[in-house]
Image: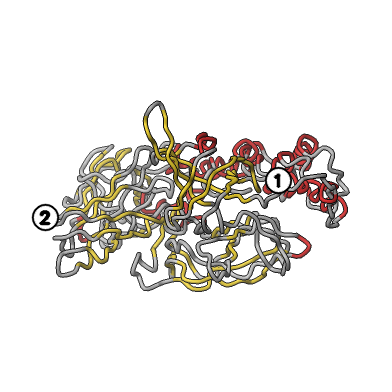
Amino acid sequence: MDSANNKTSFLVASQLPEFVRRDHPRFVEFVENYYKFLEQNGQMLYTAKKFDDFYDIDIISGANNYTNLQQKYYDNFIKYIPSTSLADLDLILKHSKDFYRSTGSGKSVKFIARILFNKNADLYYPQTNVLKASDGKWFVEKSLNVRDIAVDGVANTDAFSRFVNTTIRGNTSNSTAKVEAVNPYFDAGVLVTEIKVSGVEQDFTNGEKLFTTIEDEGVIKELSANLYSGIIVKTTVTNPGSGYIQGASVPVDSANGQGAQIIISKVAKAKLEGTIKGVTVVLPGAGYQTNTALLFTGGGGSGAAANVNIVDVSETYHPSSYSIVANTIEIVANNIIANTLDNNEGFAYSNLATISITTANLDLSTGPGANVNIATLSFAQQNSNVYFETGDVLFVRGPNTYHTITESNRYYWELNVSPGLAGSLANVSFDVHKKPNVNTILSSAFNYWTYGNCGPIVATAIINPGSGYIELPAVSVVSNTQIRSLGILGRLEVYGGGTGYANGDVIQFTNKPGSYGIGANAQVSLVDSNGAILQVSWFAIPGHLPGGSGYTQELLPDVSIISANGTNANVKVVAIIGDT
């Protein structure tokens, strides 16, 4: 009873503001997992969204949590059929309406004997042995079954009674007959109109149109119907076989008939092997790696396991590897981020603040006075092995005092410091203690890794076939969570190549309302002689991954092509990297 298309958890990320998704990914993941819990079998959201499915006895009979509801159906509709019946109660329930409609008929008696005792009943009608005195009149009643009743070509199922006392003619056979009576009834749930005829000239042709004329308020109209014969309305299983799956189609082999399709509506659990034989790739998606696990849900069985066996790494649809920058903000969560450099200051030195740097090729001097705020370097600053910036601390040897730089200039040899230095210092050596800076913190805050050898799924492999499956389960791919959360556009499909396009024409992406993807860029990479697009490819812009980020499978962006001469192309985004 699982559905992959009606889940609130899929919508969480797209409903949260962009800054929440960017700055608080764990909160987004927490909310998604909360809704995923509520969507599990038996939980509140699952029950609420699946309520309409409970009308289907086949669905609830395959679940473990709806025994009481199943019993309610039995009590309401087949109350007098004992639970010890040899027949399948679910199957009886599905056809109970047909049974009640035929109550009192010979078919209903045979049906009861079959479901209660698994025996075929023979009926005896006393009238067959009653002798009627002086009853010399007898005849064999003939009838035709028809459907699609129409008056002047307009469907009118209520007009069946107008056939009485008319002469009908076959459009193909040209045979004629007189209609004596009309009797509508249901056969296996299908409405059938039986026309009892006499004076049949010759046999009618299967499926042909029968017609006659009637007068309606002074207007002569054509009354017609199609001969209802040779159409399958009921099947009998003579050999149940094994290994069949509910919902599978069975071919009908006939010397004359054609076009029939038989669908297996019920299988006996005791007769079913219930193993998964293989998984067919219907939608190959984008950005999957080999050996990625598949997840089987529903179907009534358990234990099935499979993985992705082959992926397309040809880069026809997207790059086969992505360089990912992962945020590890916990490392620096409690650090104070220092001010970055302004245009008037030197470049930050990469060492940590705890390292003391000796400026061997620089000396420091000051002018006269008791509290001098300007220190003069012996060489221009750019010739040093260290750049100075506001906030650095100088340890001046000689007086052995600490002083914080308040202003520096890369292209000048003076530093402003506080507190002031002793006056008249001449060529004194010093150490620099660098302040915490953006290079220090961000280099610790991120790690870099490559997501490679990925592509659309080509084939899968079964690891464990499982057991007990009574219908086809839903299958999803358990892809890399971090990659899937990035929301990288992965696959473009060309549904119409148009004309007049050229290689290099830029493909533009426009977000739908409620979506916040950014950075996707692609271009036309191959056209034919008429300028019809044959292939497109992704290209990255600085600061973004190929395919951008922040997009969702539920709200894929619209695509347009910027071209000088091209028209009528139809290109769409169909997949997110690693997202099913």
Q: Given the current orientation, which residue lies at the most extreme front position?
A: 134
| Image coordinates for residue 310, horizontal then vertical, percent | 49, 73
Helix, strand or loop at label 1? It is loop
Please tell me how crowded label 2 is: few (under 14), some (14-19), or many (20+) other residues with Cα within 10 Å.
few
Helix, strand or loop at label 2? It is loop
Whole-number angstrom distance, CA of label 1 to CA of label 2: 64 Å
At label 1, the amino acid type is His
Q: Residue at x 20, y 51 (%)?
A: 410
Disc ID at residue 136: none
- Counting residues from the start of the chain, the first of labels 1 and 2 encountered is 1
Disc ID at residue 95: 1
Please tell me how crowded label 1 is: few (under 14), some (14-19), or many (20+) other residues with Cα within 10 Å.
few
Q: Nearer the viewer, residue 204 or 439?
A: 204
Q: Residue at x 41, y 55 (%)?
A: 576
Q: Given the current orientation, which residue lies at the most extreme left position?
A: 564
Q: Are marks 1 and 2 in contact (CB under 8 Å)?
A: no
538 relative position to 336: left or right = left
Position above or below: 44 against 569: above
Q: Residue at x 64, y 71 (%)?
A: 463
| Image coordinates for residue 496, horizontal then vertical, percent | 26, 59
| Image coordinates for residue 304, horizontal then vertical, percent | 66, 64
Q: Looking at the image, can residue 473 be seen?
A: yes
At label 2, the amino acid type is Ala
Q: Which residue is mark 2?
A: 564
58 relative position to 376: left or right = right
Q: Looking at the image, can residue 354 be seen?
A: no
Rendered image quadrant of residue 212: top left
